[in-house]
Amino acid sequence: MFVRGLVKGLSVTLKHFVQTYLGHTGLRDGVRPDPTLGGLFTVQYPDEKLPMFPRFRGALMHLRNPETGEPNCTACGLCIRACPQQCIEVEGEGKGKERKVTAYRYDLARCIFCRLCVESCNFNAIELSQEYELATYSRDMVWDLEKLLALGDKYGVHETGKAW
Ligand code: SF4
Ligand code: SF4
């Protein structure tokens, strides 16, 4: 009885060991193959990167008006009030509908990715991106508008048409 159980357990181990070296390996078009097909299950990071989950909360990004290319932000300041960590500073110019953002500072080191800033924004100007490679050698982790817009250009909006 004991030997039968041992052989059965080892046969399962052997089966998975052999499967590891057969079948699909790595990513295919950015998608991890079905693990039941066999093959190496680990991704060769950083050469290969898994796509993040649609609702992943990474660093903040700024979104543009797709027609004009201008930032959607109107520097209304609601996100500043919503942020429990005081991560955000905004400067703007103009009044009413003409008002637009001139500077935006986001302190990544303080952010807890709660997304309250995004929920407070009425202009679809900000969203949490898929960016997860946030390690840096610098202690200055305050990102300016240019960097936040570049991140928005990189990740854009989800295929559903909504921001991520
Ligand atoms: S990101 Fe949104 S809430 Fe924050 S200042 Fe700009 S428009 Fe207002
Ligand atoms: S995600 Fe939360 S902590 Fe980070 S900037 Fe937005 S409101 Fe502040």
Image: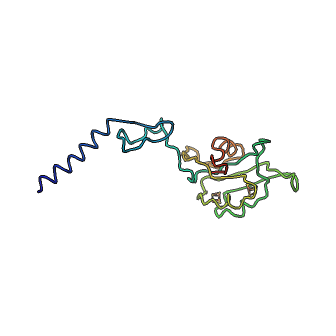
For residue 5, above or below residue 16: below
Q: Residue at x 68, y 46 (%)?
A: 148
Color encoding of the figure: rainbow
The image quadrant in which ligand 1 is located: bottom right
Is 19 positioned to the left or the right of 7 in the image?
right
**Number of numbered markers:** 0
Depth order, front residue of 76/107: 76
Residue 69 drawn at (x, y percent):
77, 41
- The x and y percentages for residue 48 are 48, 37
Q: Quadrant of the N terminus?
A: bottom left
Classify residue 147 by image quadrant: top right
Identity of the residue drawn at 16% across and 54% down: 5
Q: As displayed, is residue 96 above or below residue 11?
A: below
Q: Position of residue 4 (x, y in %)?
A: 13, 52
**Is residue 93 shown above or below 50?**
below
Q: Name which residue lies at 36% across and 44% down.
A: 36
- Tell me residue 85's x, y (percent): 64, 62
Indicate left or right for 133 with 160 as reference: left
Quadrant in which residue 153 is drawn = top right
The image quadrant of residue 35 is top left
Say whether residue 34 is left or right of residue 95: left
